[in-house]
């Protein structure tokens, strides 16, 4: 006759199994999490590669500049799969998540912010195509004309509807900086969002004005301030640094005075003035 397990033996087995589970379950969870993290990084790398390809075809960044687009814009360009998913959540990456490309001292950096609200299937979304340049430059204190976007359905038919537009921070043409403009449109219950980056910059040198060339006597020339009768204005409205190279030795003759004005953005203007020292 076979003898069964005693209660004590069964309890011992259960204790051993529980101990094994305490060791195995965290290890398995860690392996699964690491696997998802690895897949996530691979997906992020694929998005960054698509961003690099997008930049090549759409914009050129100067040193210190950056541009922001949405994942939807990469999908518009056919550079990323429509159903690209976040392995950590098993959900689609948001169509409206923001992607930043930055020129940092000549090195391009790609930043992916996986936060967003639009998890809809991209094939259901209206298509928004930015009119003009996705990276738009505006000279400081000039006029900015918003060219808007063109809206089509998934097969290319033009559609109409309300397109909301916002700029963050509030656009100031008198302030140098980078501004992010977002366009959003809802169509048949689905919403899409695209971005334009606006850079307000100063690329024009100061304006140096003087009435005419100078005629000075020997006594006048000895203590003459060659900055006293000139006007320097910059389109930024900020003051500019002015240097004077006169090379005048006060002897009678004709001389050239060189004015150099430099604004806060590093733009320079050089203007030469003729000075006559009379006997």
Image (cartoon, rainbow, N blue to C red):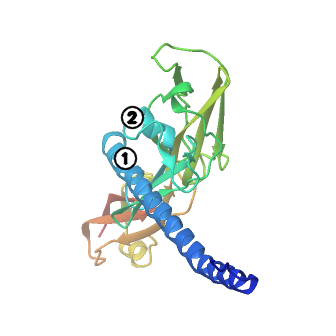
Pointer 1 residue: 50
User: Dot 1, crowdedness within 10 Å: few (<14), some or many (≥20)?
Assistant: some
Viewer-side residue, 243 vs 21: 21
Question: Distance of mark 2 from mark 1, alpha carbons?
Answer: 9 Å
Viewer-side residue, 174 vs 10: 10
Q: Position of residue 65 (x, y in %)?
A: 44, 56
Left or right position of 214 against 225: left
Give the secondary structure at mark 1: helix
Pointer 2 residue: 77
Looking at the image, residue 241 lies above or below residue 6: above
Viewer-side residue, 218 vs 60: 60
Left or right position of 256 against 26: left
Res 176 → quadrant: bottom right
Tally of marks: 2
User: Dot 2, crowdedness within 10 Å: few (<14), some or many (≥20)?
Assistant: few
Is the residue under label 1 in contact with that under label 2 (CB below 8 Å)?
yes
Q: Position of residue 34 (x, y in %)?
A: 49, 68
Looking at the image, residue 120 lies above or below residue 126: below
Which of the marked residues, 2 or 1, is nearer the chain's N terminus? 1
Res 237 → quadrant: bottom right
Q: Position of residue 52 (x, y in %)?
A: 34, 50
Q: Is residue 223 visible?
A: yes
Give the secondary structure at mark 2: loop
């Amino acid at each position: 006759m076979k003898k069964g397990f005693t209660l004590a033996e069964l309890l011992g087995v259960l204790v051993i199994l529980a101990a094994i589970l305490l060791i195995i379950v965290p290890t398995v969870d860690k392996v699964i999490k690491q696997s998802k993290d690895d897949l996530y990084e691979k997906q992020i790398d694929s998005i960054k590669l698509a961003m690099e390809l997008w930049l090549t075809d759409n914009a050129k960044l100067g040193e210190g500049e950056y541009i922001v687009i949405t994942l939807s814009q990469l999908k518009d360009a056919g550079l990323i799969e429509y159903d690209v998913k976040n392995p950590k959540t098993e959900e689609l990456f948001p169509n409206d998540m923001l992607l930043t490309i930055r020129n940092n001292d000549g090195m391009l950096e790609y930043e992916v912010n996986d936060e967003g609200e639009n998890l809809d299937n991209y094939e259901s979304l209206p298509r928004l195509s930015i009119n003009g340049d996705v990276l738009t430059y505006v000279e400081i204190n000039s006029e900015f004309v918003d060219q808007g976007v063109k809206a089509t359905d998934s097969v290319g038919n033009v559609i109409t509807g309300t397109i909301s537009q916002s700029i963050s921070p509030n656009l100031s043409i008198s302030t140098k900086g980078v501004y992010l403009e977002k366009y959003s449109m809802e169509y048949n219950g689905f919403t899409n969002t695209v971005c334009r980056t606006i850079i307000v910059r100063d690329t024009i040198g100061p304006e140096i004005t003087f009435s005419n060339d100078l005629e000075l006597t020997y006594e006048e020339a000895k203590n003459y301030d060659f900055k006293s009768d000139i006007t320097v204005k910059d389109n930024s409205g900020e003051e500019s640094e002015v240097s004077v190279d006169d090379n005048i030795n006060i002897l009678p003759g004709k001389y050239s005075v060189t004015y150099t004005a430099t604004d806060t953005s590093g733009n320079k203007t050089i203007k030469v003035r003729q000075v006559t020292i009379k006997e």
